[in-house]
Every structure is written in C-alpha cells, then in structure tokens.
Amino acid sequence: MSDLTHLTISEARAKLRGKEITAAEITEAYLSAIERANPVLNAYVAVTADKAREMAKASDAKLARGEGGALEGIPLGIKDLFATEGIHTQACSHVLDGFKPHYESTVTSNLWADGAVMLGKLNMDEFAMGSSNETSYYGPVINPWRRSRLDTVVMPTTHHGDGGFVSAGGAKTARTLDNAQLVPGGSSGGSASAVAAFLCAGATATDTGGSIRQPAAFTGTVGIKPTYGRCSRWGVVAFASSLDQAGPIARDVRDAAILLKSMASSDPKDTTSVDRPVPDYEAVIGRPIKGMKVGIPKEYRVEGMPEDIEALWQKGIAWLKEAGAEIVDISLPHTKYALPAYYIVAPAEASSNLARYDGVRYGLRVPGKDIVEMYEKTRAAGFGREVKRRIMIGTYVLSAGYYDAYYLQAQKVRTLIKRDFENVFAAGVDVILTPATPSAAFGVADEDMNSDPVKMYLNDIFTVTVNMAGLPGISVPAGLDGKGLPLGLQLIGRPFDEETLFQTAHVIEQAAGRFQPDKWW
C-alpha cells in the first residue's frame, strides 16, 4: 500500500474514479508514511488521522455512487497558516498556543467542497517569516534531499583459478549521500518537504516574498504563486496583507494546475479577491508554445551566482527555444531595489497585523501586574526572534519622522517595479524566465546564513519582485547541481495569466524530467 503514496494527483484521481483503489486505502498509506517519516523530517505539526479517515470514508461513499468532486479522496497537507475549523491553527508560533478557530478558510473550504482529504497541519516558519523553516516554534523542517558526492572506487584485477578467466580492474564511480541535514526553504518548508517525501499528494502554501517558489526549488517540487487576488486570503493568518497569496505545492505541473483550480475563487469576505472566472488550468497542459515570446531579464544575473544556476538558466532558454518560443533580452531596471523595498513594506504591514496578538482573546497569556505588563510579557514570550526583528523594523519605518524617508519611498519603488513589468508585457513578452533561487538548499543551522539576516533575506532576491508587482510566478524543477541537489527555474506571467505559466512550465518539465530524493528517512 505504500506505493499509493507515489501516485500523482492525476494518477490517483483516475484510479479512485476507476475503483482500482479507495480513498481509505490511499489515506492509510499516507498516514503510515507520515508515522514513519515525520519524527525525522518534522514536516507536520499536527496529524489529523481521525478526521482524515472520516473524510476518506465520505469520499468512498460518493465515489461508489459515481459522484464526487474534482479532488474526491485526494489526501492533502495544509500549511499551519490556514484556519481549519476546530483544529489547531497556530502559524507555528507560541503566541497562538491552543488556538482552534470556529471557522474555515475559504481556500480549505473550496478544497473540502471538491472532496479533498485533510491529513494534518504542516510546519512553517513562524507567521511565514523566514526562508529556511528554522523559525518555527516547533523546530526546523528537514529537507528529504541530501547532498551527494561522486566517489571513485578502484576495482582490483582478480584471477579466477589456474588458467581461469581474469576480471579486469579499473575505476568506477558511485554516488554517496552526505549525512548533513538541509533546510527545505521557507516559509512553506513543511509543505515542500511533505510533498517531496511522499507524505501528502499535494499541499497548500502561501507566498509573501517567495515562500512557495523558493521551497519548491529547494525540494524538486512545483510551486505556483498565483496573481494577487486569485485566491481568497480570508481565514489565512496575515503576514503582509498587500503581498500574501495562497497557492499549491505539488509533485508535477499538472498536479499544481489541478490544485489551483480548486483553491482559487472570488470571495466577498476578502475585499482583495478578484471576481473573475477561474480557468481550467489543466486543459492547457501539453499545448505547444510555438511563437510565444519569452523574456530574459539581464538584471537577474547577480554577482556570486553559482555556475550551476547560470548553466541551468541557459538550458531552460534552449529548451523553450527548441519548443518554438522566441527568446528576447529584456530589462527590469528597478530589480536591484526590490529586496530592500520589500523588507520595508512587508515588516511595516506585519507590525500592524501582529499587533492583535495580545493575550486577551486567544492564544498564549503570560500574567502581569497590570494589563500593559501582561501585553509586554505575552508578546515577549510568544514571538520568536525573527518575528520580533520584523515587528521592530516595521514599527521603526512607520514611526514619526521615518515614514516618508522609508515606507513612502519603498511604496514608490514598488510602483516602479510594477511599471517595469507592465512595460515588458506591453512590448509583447508573454512570459519571463529567471532562476528561482540564487543557490541550492543549504544546511540546517548554517552559521553563515543564521549569523547575518541579510544573507538569509537574499534567498528571496529572484522572487520578491513578483509579489511587489502582484504577478503570478511558478517554480519548476529543472535539474540537479553538482552535489545532486535540485534547482528550479521561475516563470513570471501577466496578471491572471496562470495558464501561460502552466503551459510553459510543462515544456520545461518534459525536457528536464522529474526528480525525487533517494530515500534515507
């Protein structure tokens, strides 16, 4: 039954509808896999086994009657940022200890309406603030991928008896896994790790500055951040409200398209939700891209970028060209200002959004001699180091005397970044191709990364522009580096043109093949 966990969503869907397998069987296979692997990978912070079995039973009843939704019986993992009625939703923060919402997020409501089964809540960086999934109150998530090295083994010449045959010696190579633990990226590290390690068929995630695309690239999975407004933010714990957007992480492009179709909707409860039809994304998979114009931005060649990533980018360009696309060089001149502007806008919004956690109504409460001391002690004990850092940055840039100098300037830069993309798309470019990340996955508790927050923030250098401009972006696995770790390419599209992203990403996926880690867990 463990083989059932290796089915893609589209494969599982066909077998469920064909009555070759049951929702109960595939759900039990995933629950068994989680039981074995989670003590090592720490991808789940809560496993909802009873709920999963109950939902699977209901799905089997529907399937037996020839009924069921688009995801009927498909087991999914849910990032701990999505409100799930009656089930702990804590944003992996101590300050939300014990919080069980009395409502369901719109995104998860849509998934349950389509028949999906919830396996549990997935680990993440606290309040989605992080690029390595090391800021979670529940400990770091471990990437199922490990570095490997090619060892040369010298084989001796062997004589087999008097006058017998001789086995010639020589050198042979073998790939050996390194034992060093790697991060899965963040903030949706639990989602990416669980999908890559076959602990769910797919997962929900969120992306504020790269939190879907970067972990997808680090784990050899597919992750799409849709256009801002495509998925409802209602019931998703807020980090930076003008940047946050929900999306899926899946094992292949088709599965990501299937999941986004179910997750996306307009929603009167979210004023930023856009009222426009949700296309059948899966229908574009396999369509040719002949004649499509693909832009290559010169500003994405950054100093110190590994040769592996530059080589992969060139390979991606060649694949799209071979498929009939026209490759054009483009300029996005304000790209270099995106990261500092992002790290002003996002913390500013976070400092406002996180002011609501005070210990009065829900979550952690640390007693004090009066209400002010209770606030102070609760927030000091409840928030982790990175969250405190961003609240302080945000409060500073919004304070009297600094608002105009920092926050207002960052918003002006944001407008210029958006205009850069508008100009490129107005000139006829259909999609933009860039690297997804400036490196492959790095080590857990990496001293160089953790000693300097700016180095950690640089992981988002290729992804933040997409959020600042409100555009859709997808990360698709495209190869392995010299140490056997996955690398991703990013495609950026016009507003609400996720279809072109899926269409183009599938071409890259077909050319590159699919990747999965050697099992060690």
Image (spheres, rainbow, N blue to C red):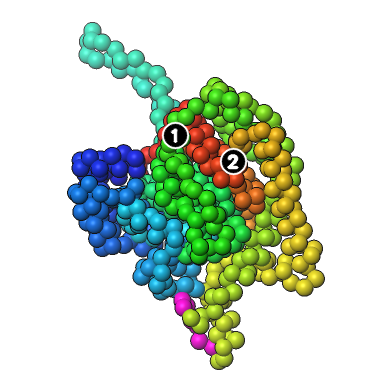
Q: Amino acid at mark 2?
A: Gly
The reply to whether residue 364 is visible in this rendering is yes
Q: Which residues are magenta?
A: 362-368
The type of residue carrying mark 1 is: Ile
Residue 133 sits above or below residue 382 on the image: above
Residue shown at the point (57%, 59%) measured from the top left: 272
Question: Which residue matches tag 1?
Answer: 285
Closer to the chain start, of discs 2 and 1, is 1
Measure the C-alpha gap from mark 2 to mark 1. Answer: 16 Å
**In the rendered image, is residue 79 in sight?**
no
In the picture, residue 369 is in which quadrant? bottom right
Q: Position of residue 254 (x, y in %)?
A: 41, 39
* Residue drawn where x is 45% and y is 48% of the image: 260
Q: Nearer the viewer, residue 386 or 397?
A: 397
Circle 1: is it few (<14), some (14-19), or many (20+) Cα within 10 Å? some
Q: Please, what is the dominant secondary structure of the magenta stretch?
A: loop
Q: Is residue 421 magenta?
A: no
Give the label on residue 493, or none. Answer: 2
